[in-house]
Amino acid sequence: MRRNAAICTRGSDRRVVASRHRCGLATHACYRAIVTKGVGFQNVDGTADAGSFVVYLDTVSSVATVQAYKRRILGALGLREGMRALDVGCGTGDDVRAMAAIVGASGAAAGVDVSEALLDEAKKRAAGEGVSVELRSGDAHALPFPESSFDVVRTERVLQHVADPARVLDEMVRVARVGGRIAAAEPDWQTLVVDAPDHRLVRRIFDARCERVRHAWIGRQLAALFRDAKLADVGVSAETLIVTDLALANVLFELRSAAKEAAAEGVVSEGEAAAFVAELDSRAAAGRFFASLTGFVAIGTRR
């Protein structure tokens, strides 16, 4: 395993989140749609406001440190001109377009997503930038491509939401050629930490938050999943996102809504939830706020 990479947020990230707040992302209703079991990214088109997911994805992707680890993944996959590449769960298609820029006209970049709303946005962006990509509607559990179609297959922050991560990985292996490279990047929500004095209260709130994610521990499970899929040359690295700006943390980690949801579920009292939020606000005002989340990236080769 590569040494853990600790990453801090930058001023540009704070400007990004300020813009997203003006769009109304940081509302309890939006967060609830994103993280609650049975809806959210498992069923974007079944929610009342698919546009909020576009805003959320844009916010995450605009963080400079997220952009950096995306570039590292593509570098580790050995993506180059002339290759065929696939992004599973492509969302608004940002990573598909990034791959298209690398593989060039002699290669091909494709994306698949179950959400028609996100695919529509992806198609608009590709057309607006004049980028040639292939975008298909499909279930990650049954990818709409023949066997051995791609040199590189990637997915990011998707396995945490799907019904059967192992089956999705098997599909990624199926559509990769022999010798093709496969990558998955996923958070491990049990690694979410925040500096606050009441450790037990923090853990109760964050444990309840984990329960609202279908596969909250998927990050730590990637190594075993890749080996179970019979991939060769499996490597796992860790990426720790350190956030010292509370506004950005509330977008990335849903801290305020986590406290509200925990209170609504009876995990903590309303007073405890309010105290948690007040403590974070106080630390932010004093320049002492700190939070982090660790994710894992697994890369392997199809035999």
Image (tube, helix red, strand yellow):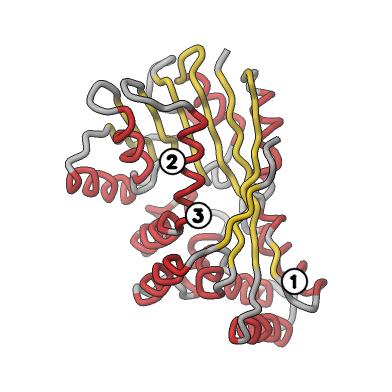
- Res 229 → quadrant: top right
Q: Which residue is mark 3?
A: 65
- Relative to residue 270, is residue 150 depicted above or below? above
> Residue most toward the right?
200
How crowded pointer 1 is (Cα within 10 Å; few <14, some 14-19, many 20+) is rated as many
Q: Which residue is mark 2?
A: 89
Quadrant where the C terminus sits is: top right
What residue appears at the point 68 percent right and 60 percent down from the top-left corner? 192
Q: Disc 2 or 1, which lies upstream in sequence?
A: 2
Q: Disc 3 or 2, which lies upstream in sequence?
A: 3
What mark, if any, has residue 202 been given in the picture? 1
How crowded pointer 2 is (Cα within 10 Å; few <14, some 14-19, many 20+) is rated as many
Cα–Cα span, label 3 and label 2: 21 Å
Cα–Cα span, label 3 and label 1: 25 Å
What residue appears at the point 68 percent right and 58 percent down from the top-left corner? 211
Question: Residue 194, how many percent across, how many down?
Answer: 69, 69
Quadrant where the N terminus sits is: top right
